[in-house]
Amino acid sequence: MTGNDFDDELKDALIPDAGPHAGPATHSSDMSVITSDKIAGVDPQAARAALADVPWEPGAKKPDPILVADHVVRRFGGLTAVDADHVEIQRGVITALIGPNGAGKTTFFNLLTNFDTPDEGTRVFDGHNIDKVPAHKIANYGMVRTFQLTKALSKMTVIENMKLGATGQKGESLWRSVLPFMWKNQEREIEARADALLDRFKLSHMRDEFAGTMSGGQRKLLEMARALMVEPSMVMLDEPMAGVNPALTQSLLGHVTGLRDAGMTVLFVEHDMDMVQEISDWVIVMAEGRIIAEGPPASIGQNQAVVDAYLGTHHHSALDLEAEL
Amino acid sequence: MDWGSIIESLFRGLIGESFIVFALAAIGLNLHFGYTGLLNFGQAVFMAAGAYGLAMMVATIGPAANRNFGWDLSESTLFWLGIFVGVVVFPVVFALIMGIPTLRLRADYLAIVTIAVAEIFRIVVRSPTPSIKKWTNSSDGLTGFSGTFYDMSPFSTQDRYLFNLFTGNQMFLVIVGWGVLAIGATICWLLIRSPWGRVLKAIREDEDAARSLGKNAYSYKMQALILGGVFGAVGGMIRAIGFSVAQPDNFITDVTFFVWVALILGGAGKVLAPIVGASLVYGLLNFSDTFLREGVAAEVIPESIMTGTQVGQVRFMLMGLGLALLAAFRPQGIFGNKEEMALDDR
Ligand SMILES: Nc1ncnc2c1ncn2[C@@H]1O[C@H](COP(=O)(O)OP(=O)(O)OP(=O)(O)O)[C@@H](O)[C@H]1O
Ligand SMILES: [Mg+2]
């Protein structure tokens, strides 16, 4: 489904050429260089193969985790929305996070990206403890997320949306902003990278339109493309397919596997089991705030705990689950 | 009816001192509201900060420092220090007071705090309590701080300039004001076209999206609040120099309201909007004022409709009517874009 040329072009778009002026000038552009190195250093095939030895049980240890969450608890009044004992996300693979409505998936996402603060627990991303790190710094560490309710910046054009995503921009400092010669070159590089990504995501024709004029599916695409401008090592997608028409779904799936093949780690929330089966390397199942099952996609439909969580304890067959989903 | 004086009054409004003052304050508000989405309902306090920063430095703080520390700072030194205090120190302090507790919260908290800070400052400044009055001189306000400025004027105080519109001192103030306005508008234009401005707009559209892309929304909102406040302070300082007095009641809530009117009339989020908006507001206010006064005096407008003393109120009624019409027929303002505005509702 995913052509190799797509992967190559995506890599080209994601990893900037090391031109003469691409040298790190600020510590944040350092970051982007490190990110590219990391992406280059990840072998997705080996990462996937390594999952073969991981036991199919909640909280299973991974050979090379990029993200580790321990005893993460979030309560809203009397409701415990998330109570995740131990979760590890393997680097370089696509992990799906599934579970019934209200299972706590979005809340867990918010906790992992520090858009929300847990009542208890620790989180470590890529060797950094991120418990006290503000949400905006998470992106500089290389983790970027999208939102279940898409956040296109309506009154900015599509290309402006894209350019916003680049990190380490010199012109984002107040002093330098009024001296265009300080940032024009970097801006040109950013714009070229943005255009390449828009092209990949078939959004070039919308380039100069306001993002608010886009359809729901186009916004999902834009949000994903914009997240990639960060040059992340890990992308977290909250229901990337929700509301996207089936014709677009295939191309979105291609984009997601393309990210993995470019060396990124992907964690996504999804209700569409076909998509989960098709592209994920590993599946984590949440219900009522807890991690109730883990395993490769094929193992999930057979798992009694999952069947119970989705359908209630009175159902007893995996076939029912397949039928319902 | 004396059409000559009606036209003169119109032009004084379009290009005169009030236009400059309110255009600068509205540029600041545009940075706050138009670009960053910050609801500031206390722009008057930033204007007061500029006025009082200068006036207190020259008239009360400076002389007190000279007395107490045995310094010998001249009036003109104090004037330039006062410009720094009024344009930088006071507005930064006010912005921090308003911003630190509220900028992490929802937009409405800032709105409430800005109104409160503006009123608290005004009421404290006009307090007759001796310990405060010796610094701010209560409701009479501070005078004697604009001498250094007018001493620099190359214009004769005897003559009138620019088709008799301005006295020599006014002409000097207006020319300096235009210069400051041109520089301010250029800076604003540069800021908005830069990646910095792009982050502001992103925060206006969706703060969480900006944060997910690595932008420190709190810091940018604070920068915008401070910078917009500085523009307001420059405006307020020019107002005080123009009146040669810094008086609390020149910075009442109505002043904030006029700044908003100028911005909304021009179209929030457009670089030229504050300038054209302020020009039109004061042009129309002056025009209707003089027109009605002349009309009443010439008995073209009969006393059964209004008397000369009612003109002041009637022109604000006309302004209200104008605003209602604007909201009905061109809600996006003069420079705004209707399609862009409609994107909010999708
Ligand atoms: N801010 C909040 N205040 C109170 N309760 C909340 C809040 N956010 C989430 N919850 C509750 O936490 C639980 C988990 O919600 P969450 O949005 O994480 O579910 P989800 O798994 O993402 O569901 P869906 O698949 O429908 O998106 C729900 O019961 C929800 O009502
Ligand atoms: Mg959700």
Image (cartoon, coloured by chain):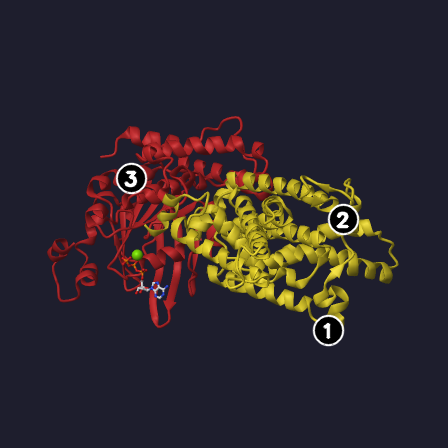
Chain colours: A red, B yellow
Closer to the camera in the image, A284 or B210 = B210
Question: Reading the chain from its start, which is encountered first: label 1 or label 2?
Answer: 2
The reply to whether the C-beta atoms of the residues labelled 1 and 3 are less than 8 Å apart is no
- Determine the secondary structure under disc 2: helix
Indicate the chain on which mark 1 is placed.
B
Residue B90 percent across, percent down from the top left: 67, 56
Q: Which residue is mark 3?
A: A257
Horizontal side, residue A179 vs residue B264: left or right: right
The answer for which chain carries disc 2 is B
> Which residue does the numbered mark 2 point to in the structure image?
B80
Q: Residue at x 61, y 52 (%)?
A: B232
Q: Quadrant of residue B89?
A: bottom right
State left or right for residue B305 relative to residue B233. left
User: In the structure shown, which secondary structural element does the residue marked by tag 1 occupy?
Assistant: loop
Q: Give the residue at mark 1.
A: B129
The percent coordinates of residue A29 (x first, y second) are 51, 38
Q: Which quadrant of the figure has residue B190?
A: top right
The residue mark sitting in front, 2 or 3, is 2
Residue A238 in view of the camera: yes
Q: Please state which amino acid type lies under the numbered disc 3.
A: Thr
Question: Which dot marks residue B254?
Answer: none
Left or right of residue A243, residue A124 in this image: right
Label 3 marks a residue whose chain is: A
Marks 2/3: CA–CA distance: 63 Å
Q: In what element is the residue under mark 3?
A: helix
Crowd class of label 3 (few under 14; some 14 to 19; many from 20; radius 10 Å) = many
In the rendered image, residue A180, in percent from the top left (x then y), is placed at: 56, 34
What residue type is disc 1 on?
Answer: Thr
Q: Position of residue B113 (x, y in %)?
A: 54, 64
Mark whose residue sits in front, 1 or 3: 1
* Identity, as a three-letter code, of the amino acid under mark 2: Trp
Badge 2 crowding class, 10 Å Cα cut-off, few under 14, some 14 to 19, many 20 or more, is some
